[in-house]
Image (cartoon, coloured by chain):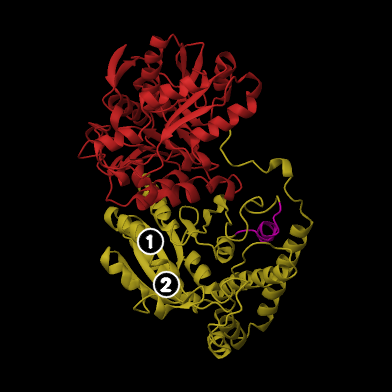
Chain colours: A red, B yellow
Amino acid sequence: MAVIQIREAIRDAIAEEMRKDDSVILLGEEVGEYDGAYKCSRGLLKEFGPHRVIDTPICENGFAGLGIGMAFLGLRPIVEFMTFNFSLIAIDQIINTAAKARLMSGGQLKCPIVFRGAGGAAKQLAAQHSNSFEHFYSYTPGLFVVAPSTPYDMKGLLKTCIRDDNPICFFESELTYSLKGEVPETEYYIPLGVGDIKKEGKDVTLISWSKNVHLALRVAEELQKDNIDAEVVDIRTLKPLDTQLIYDSVRKTNRCVVIQEQHEIASFGSYLAFIIQRDCFDYLDAPVEVVSSLEVPMPYSFVLEEYVFPSVERCKEAVYKVCYL
Amino acid sequence: MNIEEVKKYYGEMLRIRRFEEEAARLYTERKIGGFLHLYIGQEAVAVGAVAAIDLKKDYVISAYRCHGHYLACGGSVRAGFAELLGKETGCAKGRGGSMHFYDVNLHYYGGWGIVGAHVPVAAGMAYALKYRNSGGVVICFIGDGAVNIGPFFEGMSLAALWGLPLVVIIENNYYAMGTPLHKTAPVEDLSIRALGFPVARDTADGFDVFAVKEVVARAVERARSKNQTTLIDVKCYRYRGHSMADPGTYRTKEEIEEKKRNDCILKLERYLDMNGYGDVIEEIKSKIENEIQQGLQEALNDPFPAVETAEKFAYVED
């Protein structure tokens, strides 16, 4: 097994699919000459040329819509948003065009497209560049939403997404592009809708996705000092959602804390808390806790930013609460 | 004018008008829900433009006033009425409604409800055609209300940048809903917007099906042979309100009557009549009427979708 960074896993996934199928096209700001704003497309322009690795002007609505039109006529575009913060410029295309085309045409149109890029905050990028928008896209029927946490998951899921016939929002994270992990040399795909237990445990279930899976793992490690054996569930895909994996874990541990970077109100984490209490009510020994970012646009100063994010301390407090400690 | 062409376009325009008149009636009878934006008055634009392309390799996409484009591409009358009535046999299986007609087999790609948003989509379709060296061209219809919104500019600038085989036709009917053109743009000829991208520009008289055809044919040729994008301002006029909910208080009866004197269908009817084709007019009228009435009857008798299928088509199923 090779040990590679997440940005390399993304690049390899795209390159492998592009080699296999000339309908796969990458477009977005800086994807070509610059090798990607976060270097996720290093070398692709050279290998595949400017008609398949397309540098776009800064016009998210324009190139998202353009990708959708390509998909209608049989191409499989991967549209890179430098970060999902800028997907708001294109959100009408994603929600009103891509997600609804199939239903509105009575099943005539197909829109095989992947919108991918960094989601969530990085470090001190301030309010406009620190948004966590998974819930907008998860809310919309017609879209799948994927947010993996490791190089292995990132590669296997991105390859699946590129081959899927549905429009998909694929969330990465600026803070984990350099994170390394083992990835097999042989080709593999990870199906949508299958979560993963990142650490087994018996006392409490910690649920998360994307980079906060790593926070959950740190929390689990710290909890060992308190003799609490936490299980970490990485849902990997928000839609379709592996409810069975979540429910099996919660029914085993009887306690659950959801860890997310989203704000609590109307968030994906609060939705998870709702379905868990609805479907696992008899198994729960305490109400489900959700640890979220505080209810404020992200302030710049690092002391404030750290305080707004879900922290190890706040997660531990939530665990103590569901354990009545 | 070639008499066979006159007959053909006369019939095609009449077919659209009669479809729309029946749709209006169904709406007042409350058999159709939602919005209903009628194309009456603008028939020469859709028919003239489609006459200039080859639907075996070319594609058409339009906004929400879409019945005329769908029918001009050869869309079925029955499937059109069935769509308005919300029937399973509709051209979008009753899932789209008036603003979202589709017939992918005919290369008619809708039927889009967000003003201007389908311009980048059309550019993407044109990119795909160019990428595959298909020789195909995309015709994208928009209204005069669409030339001030961001996606219009973004789609046009990408088409210009990459030389996409795209023809964007502004159906300039002088009103964005009820707001007159002079309140939304500083010029009457909206093709001037082409200069900044830049793309080729042209104008056409939307009351004259032959004029539209000629201008669009030139643009299609530029797109096909030189991958050049064109923006065309076609002056036209809708006789009915923006939608059925519009009482039309923002314009005078005299203005509408004056425009009607230049009606695209009556013009060809007079031409046929003066050239001794009176019997042909009656023949075409009765053929169209039969098609309309038969399609309507069938659509009225067609089944509604089964409610158990309400969630179908949200996703592509394996």
Q: Are marks 2 and 1 on the same chain?
A: yes
Give residue A50's quadrant in the image. top left
The location of residue B186, given as percent across then percent down, is: 34, 78
* Residue that label 2 marks: B214
User: For the magenta stretch, what is the residue range?
Assistant: B75-87
Q: Residue shown at 40%/23% (left/top)?
A: A213
Direction bottom: furthest residue: B254
Q: In this view, does A256 lie to the left or right of A16?
A: right
Direction front: furthest residue: A325
Q: Looking at the picture, which amino acid does disc 1 mark?
A: Phe
Q: Is residue B80 left or right of residue B73?
A: right
Direction left: furthest residue: A33
Q: In this view, does A253 lie above or below B289?
A: above
Distance from Cα at disc 2 to Cα at disc 1: 24 Å
Q: Residue shown at 47%/38% (left/top)?
A: A264
Q: Is residue B2 above or below residue A166?
A: below
Q: Are marks 2 and 1 in contact (CB under 8 Å)?
A: no
- Closest to the observer: A251 or A192? A251
Q: Which chain carries label 1?
A: B
* Residue that label 1 marks: B152
Q: Which chain carries label 2?
A: B
Q: Does the magenta stretch include residue A98?
A: no
Q: Is residue A23 above or below residue B260?
A: above
